[in-house]
Amino acid sequence: MDRQKIINLTAAIAAVTVFGFTLGLMFPLLSLIMEKQGISADIIGYNTAMQPLGIVLSLFFIPIAVRKLGAKGTAIGSSLMVAAVIVAYPFVPIFWGWFALRIVQGFFVSMLFAISEAWIVKFADGPYRSRFTALYASVMALSFGGGPSIISFTGIDGPLPFLVGAVVLCSALLPILFVKDEQIDEEDERPLSVVGFVSKAPFLVIAVGAFAVVDAAFLGFLPVFGVKKGLSHETAAMALTFFIIGNTVLQFPIGWIADHMDKKKVIVACAGVTAVCVGLLPLTFGTWVFWLLLLIGGATSAGMYTVSLSALGDRFSGHELTTGTACFSTTWGVGALMGALGAGLAFETYGANGLPYSVAIVLGLIFLAVVPGLKKKPIQA
């Protein structure tokens, strides 16, 4: 790998780290402020859902923006727009004003991540691509988890936490300036539509959606599952911590495996292992095996996304790659929304065990559906 590619890759990962840190702040900050204002939990949930809606709306604009403004120009403009939205929150009425801001935030955040991930999978070429994407996934998870720590210093009152978040986000512009991405000859490359991408890579889209379902369901309801099963609030929170630790520290071994095997088989294996781990949680509750399953399940669920991102880079380039990462971003948004709503319904209908069992069933069905296709060539993924 040449020096410029290393610089590009480092800069892209650094930028995404800053994005993740800022977004990790915004999710709990907005919810805590609305809760303090006496807004009901269901309205807070609807407001949170506006960000995935913004992500969906951005899907068809990202390829156009990149072709018109270039990847770097679009990333810089999106960073500034997200920073402006963050600064606007404390000065806009919380109810309908925040609904609109959340949509705009999701729209431009989706552009940031689509471009950054396209850079990462593009510049992490060669036999180490899966390991580089695994490194990116680990750093992203750590930065997202560290964002809420800002609240302990700034509190939630006044514009200070928002201003800090905006300043941190703008610092992402510095590494972006070091990215050198060659211009693409638009006459030699026909743009790939979103529908065209889905028809070319349906398996990857399904894998990303499956990861999003697990991610949203467990981030939103795993601590509640623990409390309902008899754990203290502190111990229940540790359950989510174990899941995230597996998500973070075990990605590199999965990336190493994906660099030496058919990536489609690795993704399917991750789905199968996650289904087994999640399905066994109620049966092993109260034992050390429960905590081990959280670690392994967290790792393999995230592995579906990590390896899918690597496979995307193997198959696509240029504007097609940007369309692919945009589609990934939107698929995650839709899957996360479905995962959160579905987990809540399962929890309410079947009790605490409805959470792991429903997630395991969804993953198990996906696993059984795609296993017959494993005999196809890897490029069919």
Image (cartoon, rainbow, N blue to C red):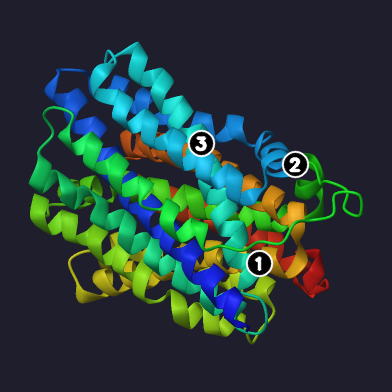
Identify the amino acid type marked 2. Val
- What's the distance in space between the residues labelled 1 and 2, CA to CA? 19 Å
Left or right of residue 46: residue 275 = right
What x and y, as percent, mark residue 269? 58, 73
**Residue 331 falls in image quadrant:** top right
- What's the distance in space between the residues labelled 1 and 3, CA to CA? 21 Å
What is the tally of numbered marks visible in this picture? 3
- Can residue 305 be seen in this snapshot? yes
What x and y, as percent, mark residue 279? 41, 61
What x and y, as percent, mark residue 265? 66, 74
Instruction: Locate the N terminus by quadrant.
Output: bottom right
Name the residue: 56% across, 84% down.
Answer: 257
Left or right of residue 197: residue 125 = left
Name the residue: 66% across, 67% down.
Answer: 122
The residue indicated by pointer 1 is 122
Q: Secondary structure at mark 2?
A: helix
Comparing labels 1 and 2, the label whose residue is closer to the camera = 1
Q: Earlier in the sequence, mark 1 or mark 3?
A: 3
What x and y, as percent, mark residue 52? 48, 34
Mark 1 touching mark 2, by CB under 8 A? no
Q: Is residue 278 above or below residue 172?
A: below
Left or right of residue 213: residue 87 = left
Comparing labels 2 and 3, the label whose residue is closer to the camera = 3
Q: Earlier in the sequence, mark 2 or mark 3?
A: 3
The residue indicated by pointer 2 is 194
Identify the amino acid type marked 1. Lys
**Residue 91 falls in image quadrant:** top left
The residue indicated by pointer 3 is 108
